Image (cartoon, grey):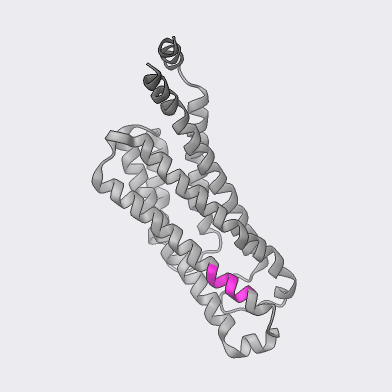
Amino acid sequence: MRQEATLARQKLTTPRAAAVAGILFSILLITSLVLIRISVPGDPRAFGAGLDGSWKPVNLALNLLPFAGIAFLWFIGVVRDRLGEYEDRLFATVFLGSGLLFLAMLFSSAAVAGGMISIFGTIPPGRLIESGVYTFGRAVTYEIMNVYAMKMAGVFMISTCTLALRTGILPRWMAFLGLALALVLLLSIGHYAWISLVFPLWVLLISVHILIANLRMPPEALSTQTEINV
């Protein structure tokens, strides 16, 4: 009887844990991306006259990214646990693989950017530009984050929305919206300044929905839990 009660509590708290992790990831990633966008020139080939005074916000943004990654990893794990036996192996593999690849590329771009910040603090800016290290580092960071990481985010969204349509864990309109936004990420060519915000905003949307749905639990679920506890 105690085991059944424990399983019931897990079923009730799993969606809430996923929602909290998703909201935390979205807030941290959006904060980091906004700090970077407003502090660094949009063109990866441009140095920017104000970089001397903007490296601190960028450094703060880079320090927030590991925590965003941890929250996203937790979000993936809780969602997979929520799917349980309804999880399709094909889409589950794509779901997990694209999520992990997105994290790997996010951390890689942050590591390159963090290395440039460290070099910037020890080498005069003029020498840094002349050596080509800054230009190369900016280009690599933008390419990994805006092209490859965002493409993996789009694949993650497609697999998540497909699983949602099959299992009904999300409203159909939300799943179709995610598919449309995923196509935008996959088919976008070039560097668009704010397109990287599409993914965390979508995660924020579904996380808020999951949290609200969990808080508005139907009376049947509450009565079932009461009977089990008794």
Name the foreground residue: 181 vs 22.
Answer: 22
Residue 205 image point, x, y percent: 51, 40
Image quadrant assignment for residue 60 = bottom right
Residue 113 image point, x, y percent: 57, 71
Image side of residue 172 versus residue 138, left or right: left
Image side of residue 156 versus residue 51, left or right: left
Image side of residue 129 versus residue 106, left or right: right
Name the foreground residue: 127 vs 51.
Answer: 127
Main secondary structure of the magenta stretch: helix
* Image point (44%, 66%), residue name: 147
* Image point (61%, 56%), residue name: 64
Q: Say whether residue 101 is magenta.
A: no
- Most extreme residue toward the right is 53
Q: Say whether residue 112 is magenta.
A: yes
Q: Is residue 181 above or below residue 121?
A: above
Q: Is residue 149 at all visible to an observer of this figure? A: yes
Range of residues picked out in magenta: 111-117
* Image point (51%, 22%), residue name: 216
Residue 105 image point, x, y percent: 45, 64
Q: Is residue 190 above or below residue 49?
A: above
Count of numbered badges drawn on the protein: 0
